[in-house]
Amino acid sequence: MTHDSTHHAKVIDHATGTAKVGHEWDGIEELDTPLPRWWLWTFYATVVFALVYVVLYPAIPMLHSASAGTLGWSSRGVLADEVAHEKAEHQGVRDALAATPIEALAADPALQRAAIEGGHAAFKVNCVQCHGAGAAGAKGYPNLNDDDWLWGGDLSAIQQTLVNGIRQPGNDATRSSLMPSFGKDGILTPAQVQDVVSHIRVLSKQDPANASSRRGAQIFADNCAVCHGANGEGNRSVGAPKLSDKIWLYGGDRASLVGTVTNAHAGVMPAWTGRLDPVTIKMLAVYVHSLGGGEAAPAPAAPAATPTAGAAR
C-alpha cells in the first residue's frame, strides 16, 4: 500500500493565501492565521516582566508567608515605615501632652486643640460602637454631649472614668454603684414598685401628684433617698443619677422605670488602662469634655484654720 502524502500537505486558502488547519464545520473552514508580531512581542515582554517581578518582590506563596524577593520590599514594611514616620512627627506633641497636667491644657490653646483632634480620632476607633459617632449614646449608653454626669464632668473626673472604667472586673479603683433589684429581690412588692415609680415620675415633672405617688413618696424616702437624695437630686459620689430631670439612661417612661426598679441595671464600661496609652486616654478625656457638657474643675477645698494659742487653751 502506498503512502498518501496528500493527507499531510497544507491546503492554502486562495483568497487569503493562508494555510487551513483542516477543521471544517458545516462547510466553514478554519484558517491557520499567525498571531500578529506585536502581540507576540507583548506576550514575551509580560513573561519577562513576571519573571523579574518574582525575583525582586514577594510573589511565591509559601506555608506562612511568601518569597521575600531580592529587594526586601513588602507592603507590611511600607506600612510600618509610614506608621513610624507619623509617630515621629507627632512625638513632640505627645511628649508635651504627657508632661502637661490635664487641668493645665486650657492654658495652651494649640496643645489643647491637638489633644481634642487626637481624642476625636481615638473616639472614632474605640468609643463609637457604644456611644455613637456623634457621642449621643443610646439606651444604656450615656449621651456625652449634655451636662448630665453620673460621676462628674470635669476633666479629671472624665479621665478617671476612662482610666478605671465602670464596674471593671479586677480593678479595685473602678467606678462602681450598686442599686438593688427591688422587685426581683423581694424588697418591694409589685404594687410598691408601681407606687415608687409614680413618685419618681412626679419628681421628674412627667405626671401630676396622685394617690399612688403619695404612697410612693414614703417608699422612696425609706429605700431610695439615701443614694438619690430626698428630692431625687442624685449623688455623684456614689454614681446615683439625678431623678428630677428628664434625662434617662434606660428610659423614663413608666414601663422602663418599673423595669429598672424591679431588676436594676449594672452597665459596664471597660477600663482603658492597658488598652490605650496614658496620652491617648488624656486626649480622649479632653475631647469628651469639649463636646458641650464638660464642667469646670471643682474649686479646691479651703484649708482648715490653724488654731491660735488662745483657742488651744
Image (cartoon, rainbow, N blue to C red):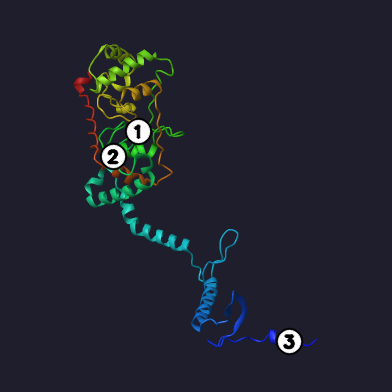
Name which residue lies at 35% across and 33% down: 139
Disc 3 secondary structure class? loop
Name the mark nearer the viewer: 3 or 2.
3
**Which residue is disc 1 drawn over?**
139
Name which residue lies at 57% across and 63% down: 61
**Which residue is disc 2 drawn over?**
155
Give the residue type that dot 3 points to.
Answer: Asp
Name the mark nearer the viewer: 2 or 1.
1
Q: Give the quadrant of residue 12.
A: bottom right
Residue 188: x percent and y percent? 39, 14
Give the residue type that dot 2 points to.
Answer: Leu
84 or 65: nearer the eye?
65
Query: Label 2 near label 3: C-beta < 8 Å?
Result: no
Dot 2 or dot 1: first in sequence order is 1
* 1 versus 196 height, above or below: below
Q: Give the quadrant of residue 197.
A: top left
Report crowding for label 1: few under 14, some 14 to 19, many 20 or more residues within 10 A (C-alpha).
Answer: few
Dot 3 or dot 1: first in sequence order is 3
The mark found on residue 103 in the picture is none
Query: Label 1 near label 2: C-beta < 8 Å?
Result: no
Q: Mark 3 to mark 2: distance in Å?
A: 101 Å
